[in-house]
Image (tube, grey):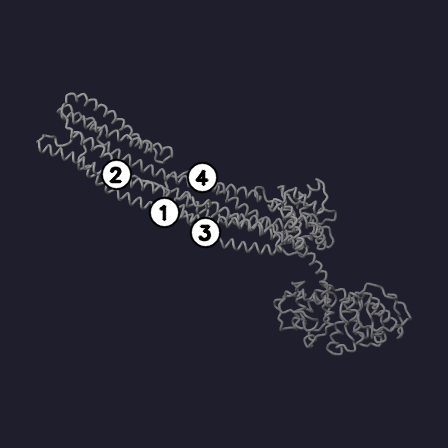
């Protein structure tokens, strides 16, 4: 370079750098009192400062060997300042005289002073004279000004900034604790950690030991010199052997590491921004996938369950229908509750996802067709509709089968009794013994036939009852109706045949009656009185053995009263029995007294005293059995009444409790009491108290199950059914969970958009004021009035635009979440597509495209592959093979175009 001579000589003293409000460090030192006098420290500074100067002088093709000798003429000093500043200094003096050297050194000191450094205690003469201490002090000032001053890390600069940078970079490494620029570096792990943090392939950090500082230091110095172009400025032996290494030497060497890695720092910042955006996008995509899967699974379960609930094919037996009812209870108790929780969680996840998308400036999530929250709610409604209809059908079917079983048993009993009575009657009616009988025999046969006709008429009611029961069984679709119909038809055909045969025999006997004159009045009277009494006993036995079914205490009390009335007639019946037996005894007395020649049996009836006594004994035996059956049924009905009252007592408490809790939750969500966190805490306390109430619901479920097992179908003691309680409980759980979620989303919105609690209270107060219907939502006109009260002056078009923002689904209402989103929208502080695009441009080195290798080098592997898979090829004029379009990708992240 062409240096020229300047005659002025100024005597400068270099003390410390003064950068005004940007002072990068406190007053460094007074060189006379500096610990530089320590020979070990001076040796370290000589080596470090000489290496640092040569790292810059070699760019100009020169170097120094002796720091206090080679700067004496000022030429290399001026050259050093030009290299490190990038500026031209005044032309140097080429003379060899002392005055020329002083002039050159003063020009260098003038340049340093011109950079804001106050020069005290150091003059050009000391440098020219080769004063080692002053020369080292001058070089240290140059290092501070040009290598350390501009370091800035997290609002700290210079020495503090460099120390903070070291601490941040070495924080993840064990056994490294950087607190200063002397003893913290003695074990060498700090240097190794800085290199490994930025170039992990150069050092196997895991093999280093804190107790081997020589190996650690030499490893770091050798790697830095070989791969990072940082000259070896220190000797490991000097650092290890010195109790406290020289701070200036360490700072000078560490600043070289900072500048070597500063470019890497910028790339890390850009990569961090991209990672942040991509992490949000990946999290949202995962939430969307989770929603789609949970929605698909829930809809598939509903799709499979509804046909089962809609199946109305009845079973033929009570046992099979009871099993269906048990399966339905299992569904209600075991299978449905988890699905209720899944549905609630699905709605919570959907609301949380939409909130996160709004907060991150992403478009709203639109689920796949058929998987909207409304679709799931509609499907759930269909499921619950099927449940209600299915349970009603089950109970009706059980009642029907119970009625059928009762009727079928009643039919069998009456048919058996009737068939036993008609057995042999046709053969008897077809006999023609009267053709050879005596007159008395004929009259006896005639009277006997009249008694039979009376008996036949008495049995007419039973035949009609049998036919009526068979008809009812057919109407109720009894599964064994064919066999019932066949038996009923046989009975009716036989009955018709008996009627015809009776009529024919009557006519024959009457034709013969005119030939007969004598009749035994006593036999006739016996037959007439014995027949109805016998029918009465048969009817009594039938009634005493008849099955019954009742559902209330009143019904069983009615049966008991009727039975007591029947028992009250027994004394009169016994008198009638004694009277009938008295007739028979009188006949025997007459036969014995008058030696009447009789055939031995009553010609007018088949009933004999033994049969009357046997049936009477049977009636007396059945009475206590009927008493016991009525007592047992009365006890069962009392137990049923106890179950009804037990259920009602609990239901009449739980029902109003659920309603009160629903009203209290509604009040909490709209009233202004404390912060959102206070409301959230209050709601969670309510949620805990509600969850703790679950054992009472389970106890009520147990009582309800006992009622169903006892086949109790009504309860006059309460208006609450178990279905009411279940629906109320599920609505309560869903409401508290949804209300908590709304408050949490409000907290997310408040924190993300910097809304103060006072603002949030103002928003809530305005919303509550205009929520005139107190539904937790404003309709369109209320919302318009709210906006006008807040100073909005808008036409229909502007209001329609605002409504499209706060009510995207066009439901005609504005929720509080949508209201605070709208009120805080203009204060949002979120990443934009332009910011992401600028970050990609940093990673691409200002190119309009980026390569896959650059993404893999700067981003974590999963996020790099995420970008590569979604970026389209770049087609601009400066494109090269493998170029990717990061601009379109950045825009697509925010929904402004399609990938």
- Whole-angstrom CA distance, mark 4 to mark 3, is 28 Å
> Who comes first in sequence, dot 1 or dot 4?
4
* Residue matched to label 4: 311
- Whole-angstrom CA distance, mark 2 to mark 4, is 53 Å
Q: Residue at x 26, y 42 (%)?
A: 623
- Observer-side mark, 4 or 3, equals 3
Front position in the image: 544 or 431:
544
Front position in the image: 639 or 826:
639
Secondary structure type for disc 4: loop
Q: Residue at x 48, y 45 (%)?
A: 724
Secondary structure type for disc 3: helix
- Is the residue marked by circle 3 packed among few (<14), some (14-19), or many (20+) residues within 10 Å? few
- Observer-side mark, 2 or 1, equals 2
Asked if the residues shown at circle 4 and circle 3 are in contact, with their CB atoms under 8 angstroms apart, the answer is no
Residue 780 - label: none
Residue 822: tell me if it is visible. Answer: yes
- Whole-angstrom CA distance, mark 2 to mark 1, is 29 Å
- Is the residue marked by circle 2 packed among few (<14), some (14-19), or many (20+) residues within 10 Å? few
> Who comes first in sequence, dot 1 or dot 3?
1
* Residue matched to label 2: 569
């Amino acid at each position: 370079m062409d240096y020229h001579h300047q005659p002025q000589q100024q005597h400068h003293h270099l003390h410390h750098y003064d950068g005004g409000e940007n002072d990068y460090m406190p007053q460094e030192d007074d060189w006379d009192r500096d610990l530089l006098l320590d020979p070990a420290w001076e040796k370290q500074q000589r080596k470090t400062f000489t290496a640092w100067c040569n790292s810059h002088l070699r760019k100009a093709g020169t170097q120094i060997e002796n720091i206090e000798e080679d700067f004496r003429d000022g030429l290399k000093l001026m050259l050093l300042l030009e290299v490190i500043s990038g500026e031209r200094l005044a032309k140097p003096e080429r003379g060899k005289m002392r005055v020329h050297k002083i002039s050159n050194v003063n020009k260098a000191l003038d340049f340093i002073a011109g950079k804001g450094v106050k020069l005290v205690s150091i003059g050009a003469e000391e440098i020219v004279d080769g004063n080692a201490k002053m020369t080292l002090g001058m070089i240290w000032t140059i290092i501070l000004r040009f290598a350390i001053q501009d370091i800035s890390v997290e609002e700290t600069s210079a020495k503090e900034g460099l120390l903070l940078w070291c601490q941040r970079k070495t924080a993840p490494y064990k056994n490294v604790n950087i607190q200063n620029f002397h003893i913290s570096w003695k074990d060498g792990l700090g240097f190794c950690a800085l290199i490994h943090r930025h170039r992990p392939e150069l050092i196997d950090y895991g093999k280093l030991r804190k107790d081997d500082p020589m190996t650690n230091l030499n490893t770091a110095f050798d790697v830095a010199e070989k791969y990072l172009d940082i000259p070896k400025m220190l000797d490991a032996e000097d650092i290890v052997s010195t109790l406290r290494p020289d701070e200036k030497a360490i700072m000078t060497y560490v600043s070289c590491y900072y500048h070597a890695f500063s470019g890497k720092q910028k790339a890390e910042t850009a990569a961090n921004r991209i990672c942040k955006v991509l992490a949000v996008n990946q999290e949202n995509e995962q939430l969307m996938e989770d929603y789609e899967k949970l929605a698909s699974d829930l809809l598939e379960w509903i799709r499979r369950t509804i046909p089962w609930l809609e199946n109305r094919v009845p079973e033929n037996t009570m046992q099979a229908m009871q099993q269906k009812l048990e399966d339905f209870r299992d569904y209600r108790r075991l299978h449905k509750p988890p699905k209720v929780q899944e549905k609630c969680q699905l709605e919570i996840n959907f609301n949380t996802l939409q909130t996160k998308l709004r907060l991150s400036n992403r478009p709203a999530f639109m689920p796949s067709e058929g998987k909207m929250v409304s679709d799931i709610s509609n499907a759930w409604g269909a499921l619950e509709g099927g449940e209600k209809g299915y349970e009603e059908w089950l109970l009706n079917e059980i009642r029907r089968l119970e009625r059928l079983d009762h009727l079928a048993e009643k039919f069998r009993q009456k048919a058996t009794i009737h068939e036993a009575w008609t057995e042999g009657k046709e053969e008897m009616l077809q006999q023609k013994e009267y053709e050879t009988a005596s007159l008395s025999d004929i009259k006896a046969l005639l009277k006997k036939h009249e008694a039979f006709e009376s008996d036949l008429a008495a049995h007419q009611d039973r035949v009609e009852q049998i036919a009526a029961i068979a008809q009812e069984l057919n109407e109720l679709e009894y599964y064994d109706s064919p066999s019932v119909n066949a038996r009923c038809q046989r009975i009716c055909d036989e009955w018709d045949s008996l009627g015809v045969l009776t009529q024919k025999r009557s006519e024959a006997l009457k034709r013969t009656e005119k030939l007969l004159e004598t009749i035994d009045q006593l036999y006739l009277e016996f037959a007439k009185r014995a027949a109805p009494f016998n029918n009465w006993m048969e009817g009594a036995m039938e009634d005493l053995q008849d099955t019954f079914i009742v559902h209330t205490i009143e019904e069983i009390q009615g049966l008991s009263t009727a039975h007591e009335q029947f028992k009250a007639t027994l004394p009169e019946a016994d008198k009638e029995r004694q009277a009938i037996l008295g007739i028979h005894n009188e006949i025997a007395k007459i036969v014995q007294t008058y030696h009447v020649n009789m055939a031995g049996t009553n010609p007018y009836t088949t009933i004999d005293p033994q049969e009357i006594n046997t049936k009477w004994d049977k009636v007396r035996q059945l009475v206590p059995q009927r008493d016991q059956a009525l007592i047992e049924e009365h006890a069962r009905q009392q137990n049923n009444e106890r179950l009804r009252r037990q259920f009602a007592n609990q239901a009449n408490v739980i029902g109003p409790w659920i309603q009160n809790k629903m009203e209290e939750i509604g009040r909490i969500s709209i009233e202004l009491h404390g912060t959102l966190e206070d409301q959230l805490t209050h709601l969670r306390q309510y949620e805990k108290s509600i969850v703790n109430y679950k054992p009472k619901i389970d106890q009520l479920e147990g009582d309800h199950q006992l009622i169903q097992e006892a086949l109790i179908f009504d309860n006059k003691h309460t208006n609450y059914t178990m279905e009411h309680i279940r629906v109320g409980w599920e609505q309560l759980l869903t409401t508290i969970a949804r209300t908590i979620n709304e408050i949490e989303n409000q907290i997310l919105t408040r924190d993300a958009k910097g809304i103060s609690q006072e603002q949030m209270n103002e928003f809530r107060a305005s919303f509550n004021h205009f929520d005139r219907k107190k539904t937790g939502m404003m309709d369109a006109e209320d919302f318009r009035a709210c906006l006008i009260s807040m100073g909005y002056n808008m036409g229909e078009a502007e209001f329609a635009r605002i409504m499209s923002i706060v009510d995207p689904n066009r439901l005609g209402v504005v929720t509080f979440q949508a209201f605070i989103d709208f009120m805080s929208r203009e204060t949002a502080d979120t990443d934009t597509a332009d910011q992401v695009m600028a970050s990609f441009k940093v990673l691409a080195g200002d190119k309009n495209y980026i390569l896959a290798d650059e993404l893999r080098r700067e981003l974590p592997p999963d996020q790099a592959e995420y970008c590569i898979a979604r970026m389209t090829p770049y087609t601009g004029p400066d494109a090269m093979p493998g170029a990717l379009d990061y601009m379109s990708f950045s825009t697509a992240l925010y929904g402004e175009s399609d990938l």
